[in-house]
C-alpha cells in the first residue's frame, strides 16, 4: 500500500492516481490562497482530466467555487456555523479518495486530512506546513525554502507525486458584469480598490491618496471605477467624492462571483494585498499591487502569460515583515501617488497595445 512506502520513495503518477481516481484538495482559506490553490486544480485537471476532484473550503468562500468546471464537488467547512461542523465532518468521512492534498498546512486543515478516508495523504513538510500539520500526512514533501510562493506549493506536491507540476492558469467561475457599470466608459477601464479586511487594515494605502490618484486618472482621460467590499462604503466615499465621474462598484450585492465578472472587464486594478487583487489577477487583469509589509515573492498576484503585474512598496529596513498590526506602516505609507499613477499609466498603455 502507498501509505506504507518510505517518505522518500519515488512515486509514479499512475500509481498515485488510477484512472478515474478521486482527489481531495484542502485549502480552507484565505481568499487569495484559495485562488492560488485553483492553480493546482487546473494543473492536475490538465494532466488528468479523468480525475474526480473535490475541494474542501470554508463557507465564506464556497460560493465562488460552486459550479467550477474542474471540480466534481465543493465540500464546505462551516466556520461561521459551529453547530454544523459535526455534520460536515461526517459528510467528509463518508467519501473515499485515492489522493488527499493539503495545500493549507496548519493544524485545522490537518485534522480534516486526518479524518478523511484517503489512500495517500500529502502535504508540505515544515516549515512551510506549520503547527505540526505533517502528523496527518503519509508523505511530507520538502520545499526549497519558506519564501516559496504559496501557489507553488501545490505544483511541487504534484511533482513529488510523479506529475509534471507545471503551472496552469486558474479557472474562476464569474457572473457577467452589470452592463450599466461600464455603459459610456471607454476602455481601458481602471478599478481602484482601497479596502482590505478589517483584520489587515494596516496594509491599506490611505484613501486620500486613492482619491488623488482617481483625480489624476480622470483628468488624464482614463475611465475609473472604485470598488468596495461589504461595509466599506464609508471607506471609499472620499475617493468617489474626490473625482466626479468615477463609478462605484459595491461588491456586497455583487458577491464574489459578480465582483469577479466586474474585475474581468477591467484592464488595470490597483489594490493592496487583498482578495479582490487576486481575483483580478485570476481574471486576467493587469494589477498594480501596493504591497507594503507582505512579501510579494510569497503572496504576490500571479501573472498570466503576457500580462505581468507591478508590485510597489516603500523601501524600509523592516520590510517584509509578518506583523499583524503596525502603528506607522511606512512600507505602504511611503508609496507615492506619483509612483502609482506612473505604474497605472504603463499598464494602461500595455493594455491598449495588446
Image (spheres, rainbow, N blue to C red):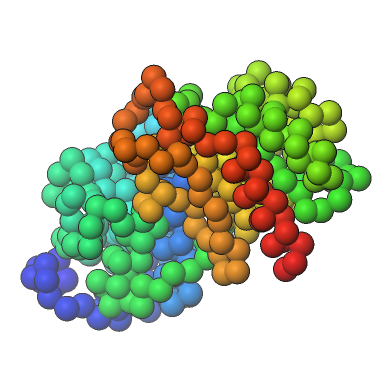
Is residue 137 rendered to the left or right of residue 260?
left
How many numbered badges does the structure rendering display? 0
Q: Examine the image and state in which quarter residue 67 appears.
A: bottom right
The image shows residue 284, relative to residue 266, as above or below, that is below
Is residue 259 rendered to the left or right of residue 48?
right
Front residue of 51/36: it is 36
Q: Examine the image and state in which quarter residue 226 appears.
A: top right
Residue at 75% from the left image edge and 67% from the top image edge: 353
Residue 122, position as x, y percentages in the image: 23, 60
* Res. 323 visible in picture: yes
Residue at 13% from the left image edge and 49% from the top image edge: 135
Residue at 41% from the left image edge and 63% from the top image edge: 40
Residue 346, position as x, y percentages in the image: 67, 55
The image shows residue 158, relative to residue 313, as above or below, that is below
Residue lying at the far right in this picture: please name it.
Answer: 184
Residue 30, position as x, y percentages in the image: 42, 41
Residue 167, position as x, y percentages in the image: 44, 69
* Res. 80 visible in picture: no
The image shows residue 150, relative to residue 196, as above or below, that is below
Front residue of 187/70: it is 187
Residue at 81% from the left image edge and 53% from the top image edge: 187
Location of the N terminus by quadrant is bottom left
Amino acid at each position: 500500500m502507498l501509505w506504507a512506502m518510505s517518505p522518500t520513495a519515488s512515486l509514479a503518477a499512475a500509481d498515485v492516481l488510477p484512472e478515474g481516481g478521486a482527489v481531495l484538495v484542502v485549502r480552507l482559506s484565505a481568499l487569495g490562497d484559495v485562488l492560488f490553490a485553483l492553480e493546482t486544480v487546473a494543473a492536475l485537471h490538465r494532466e488528468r482530466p479523468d480525475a474526480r476532484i473535490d475541494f474542501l473550503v470554508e463557507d465564506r468562500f464556497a460560493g465562488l467555487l460552486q459550479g467550477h468546471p474542474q471540480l466534481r464537488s465543493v465540500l464546505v467547512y462551516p466556520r461561521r456555523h459551529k453547530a454544523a461542523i459535526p455534520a460536515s465532518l461526517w459528510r467528509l468521512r463518508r467519501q473515499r479518495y485515492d489522493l488527499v492534498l493539503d495545500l493549507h498546512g496548519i493544524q485545522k486543515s490537518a485534522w480534516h486530512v486526518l479524518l478523511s478516508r484517503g489512500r495517500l495523504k500529502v502535504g508540505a513538510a515544515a516549515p512551510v506546513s506549520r503547527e505540526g500539520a505533517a502528523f496527518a500526512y503519509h508523505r511530507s514533501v520538502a520545499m526549497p525554502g519558506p519564501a516559496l510562493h504559496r501557489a507553488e506549493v501545490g505544483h511541487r506536491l504534484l511533482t513529488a507525486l510523479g506529475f509534471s507540476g507545471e503551472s496552469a492558469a486558474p479557472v474562476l467561475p464569474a457572473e457577467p458584469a452589470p452592463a450599466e457599470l461600464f455603459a459610456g466608459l471607454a476602455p481601458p477601464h481602471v478599478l481602484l480598490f482601497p479596502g482590505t479586511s478589517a483584520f489587515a487594515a494596516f496594509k491599506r494605502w490611505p484613501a486620500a491618496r486613492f482619491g488623488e490618484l482617481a483625480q489624476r486618472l480622470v483628468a488624464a482621460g482614463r475611465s475609473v471605477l472604485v470598488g468596495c467590499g461589504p461595509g466599506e462604503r464609508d471607506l471609499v466615499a472620499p475617493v468617489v467624492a474626490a473625482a466626479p465621474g468615477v463609478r462605484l462598484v459595491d461588491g456586497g450585492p455583487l458577491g464574489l462571483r459578480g465582483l469577479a465578472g466586474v474585475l474581468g472587464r477591467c484592464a488595470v486594478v490597483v489594490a493592496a494585498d487583498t482578495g479582490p487583487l487576486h481575483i483580478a489577477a485570476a481574471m486576467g487583469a493587469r494589477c498594480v499591487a501596493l504591497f507594503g509589509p507582505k512579501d510579494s515573492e510569497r503572496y504576490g498576484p500571479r501573472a498570466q502569460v503576457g500580462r505581468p503585474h507591478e508590485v510597489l512598496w516603500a523601501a524600509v529596513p523592516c520590510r517584509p515583515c509578518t506583523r499583524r498590526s503596525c502603528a506607522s506602516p511606512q512600507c505602504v505609507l511611503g508609496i507615492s501617488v506619483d509612483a502609482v499613477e506612473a505604474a497605472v499609466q504603463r499598464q494602461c498603455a500595455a493594455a491598449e497595445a495588446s
